Amino acid sequence: MRSDVIQTLLVANRGEIACRIFRTCRDLGITTVAVYSDADDGALHVREADLAVRLPGAAPADTYLRGDLVVAAALAAGADAVHPGYGFLSENAAFAASVQDAGLVWVGPPVKAIELMASKTRAKELMAGAGVPLLAPVDPATAAEDDLPLLLKAAAGGGGRGMRIVRELGSLPGELLAAAAEAASAFGDGEVFAEPYVERGRHVEVQVMADEHDTVWALGTRDCSLQRRHQKVIEEAPAPGLDDALRTRLRDAATAAARAVGYRGAGTVEFLVSADGRPYFLEMNTRLQVEHPVTEAVFGLDLVALQLRVAEGGPLGATPPSPSGHAVEARLYAEDPARDWQPQTGALLALDLPDAPGLRLDTGYTGGDTIGVHYDPMLAKVIAHAPTRAEAVRLLARALERARIHGPVTNRELLVRSLRHPDFAAARLDTGFYDRHLAALTAPAAGRDPARAALAGALAAAVTATSGGPAPTRFGAWRNVPSGPQLKRYRSEPDGAENEVAYRTPRTGAPEPHDAPGVRVLAVTPDRVTLELDGVARHFTVTADGDRVFVDTDAASYTFTALPRFTDPATHTEPGSLLAPMPGTVVRLAEGLAAGVPVEAGQPLIWLEAMKMEHRILAPASGLLTALHAAPGHQVEVGALLAVVQEDPAAIPVPEETA
């Protein structure tokens, strides 16, 4: 007879959450088993596990979403329990049942609870019976102007997939089709429902934990209002600015929701709180949430350890611990917020966070790993815990600012500027934060100085070339020498701006900047430069990787690509060429799209899916589609030619003075 005590645990997931669960297992003396796709061969979660089983293939549908392969892997590795993490199969009732049918312990809620909450439409009906406050559904077939704006949502999933905001009745049919198509692609179920869209609403949730002995804990509140594409970016606990009556109502509603479905284990009940303080049930996530660390920090708990205890049949205490302090979490993504949140891929050369009390890093990557195209672009979660909200926010912003992150473009600077934004500091939070502030948050920052950073990179490179070693060269100021200046050109990432640096390389001594008033060079080595800028000494840490140069300062980080002196004409593309902005899969084309058809400026032509996000390729101008190289199902690399639009001169407005 199988023991109720878990000895060996397989995590049916990858990346950050798998590594996080393994950490608790090590503390508890539990043997760990990873599963991995071919794309994850050698990934951090594979390296950290005691055992690992390959799932042949790369796409999620062929690997992490194959419940039969995961169960077979658990049995082959001798596991006696399975933890699903979040995403993938974590809320799949059939998978949970198959785990139990195989004689394995399921570290999750009862199958029946997953089934009841799997469909948001059915869940809302059940919650209404339990007295949980709800938004009244709207039938899209009879929607009128008074019902606008509407929010379309996928019934079978979350994470922003299949979600659309509709503000005009005329666009409703097309948005319904698009939402249903995305939902079917993401969850295998195209059911979509509509409800009123609450302007300036806050996303507030309650962490619940329940055992089989009729104990239900409601572990405070979390605010997750800062979102992009309906996916969370910054979360915190407790949710700030709520009065005691609202907090009590949210906890009571979450407890009622858990009891209504006979819940066991960790789960989250999510609410939308209107500007006037009225809460409405959104959904119940029957799994561990990405943002669970902020609750762990505030309550001093290990939620994964509690999940394992409950799965073994153990009890929770009569009451949870008392909360203490405030915690904030930022999700670090490999994406470019200034370019429609485009996900980024490539080699991650460095991911280093400063070590300080109250800081925590949860990640599935280390320096030297590669960020691929198949999975979510989240690199890490950085969590700060402090006695007050202001202290936690300050600690997190500074830690992100000082982190060394070399490789693909990330949202690091956006996170820092978001945390320091006056609205965030004053807890004026709602889900429209980035709709209002994104342009300002991604504009060039006043404190950045790429020209000086590029100069530091050029001086370090010159020292490397001349000395071949790290011995520092120190001097009081640079000298005039007869040798002519050398020029280096650098392109900044991700804005593409060019910086030209002039310096001299004397026969002896260190390289010296040319025509740089206000600059006094204090020290130069191949990896560190100290410049006195207008009387203030500033340090620049320089890391080179081929043609790329990473320059980190006390308050900013810069990525440059060294450019050749002359432009290669072969790099030019035909005017009107539509290039893939990232590697991905073509999921659909505009209806009737073919070579020879007319298109209008801004018209969506091609939909790409990459790293769990869907991206539209728009016509750059009105004209004729002269070539189409994309087709549904095609895998494309970054820069691949998708189509060509020949601009129609007749569509160009003629200036009045020449008309």
Image (cartoon, rainbow, N blue to C red):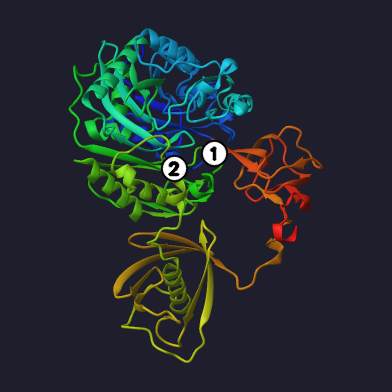
Residue occupying the far bottom of the picture: 482
The percent coordinates of residue 37 (x first, y second) are 54, 35
Residue count near mark 2 (Cα–Cα under 10 Å), binned few <14, some 14–19, many ≥20: few
> Which quarter of the rendering shows the C terminus?
bottom right
- Indicate which disc residue 645 carries: none
Q: Is residue 472 visible?
A: no
Q: Look at mark 1 in the image and give the residue it sits on.
A: 611
Q: Residue 303: tell me if it is visible.
A: yes
How far apart, in angstroms, are the residues tagged by discs 1 and 2?
25 Å
| SS class, disc 1 | loop
**Residue 569 x/y as whole percent:** 70, 66
Location of residue 378 in the rendering, given as x and y in whole percent from the top left corner: 45, 41
Q: In this rendered view, identify the residue nearer to me: 317 or 577.
A: 577
Upstream in the sequence, badge 1 or badge 2? Answer: 2
Compared to residue 532, the image places residue 176 above or below, namely above
Q: Amino acid at mark 2?
A: Arg
Query: Regarding mark 2 in the picture, which secondary structure is present there?
Result: helix
Q: Is residue 364 left or right of residue 345?
A: left
As shown in the figure, which amino acid type bears the numbered disc 1?
Met
Residue 174 located left or right of residue 341: right
Image coordinates for residue 41, horizontal then vertical, percent: 52, 40
- Residue 32 versus residue 657 in the image, above or below: above
| Quarter occupied by the N terminus | top left
Q: Nearer the viewer, residue 180 or 659?
A: 659
> Which mark identifies residue 436?
2
Q: Residue at x 47, y 83 (%)?
A: 504
Label 1 vs label 2, nearer the camera? 2
In the image, is 382 to the left or to the right of 504?
left
In front of the other: 642 or 376? 642
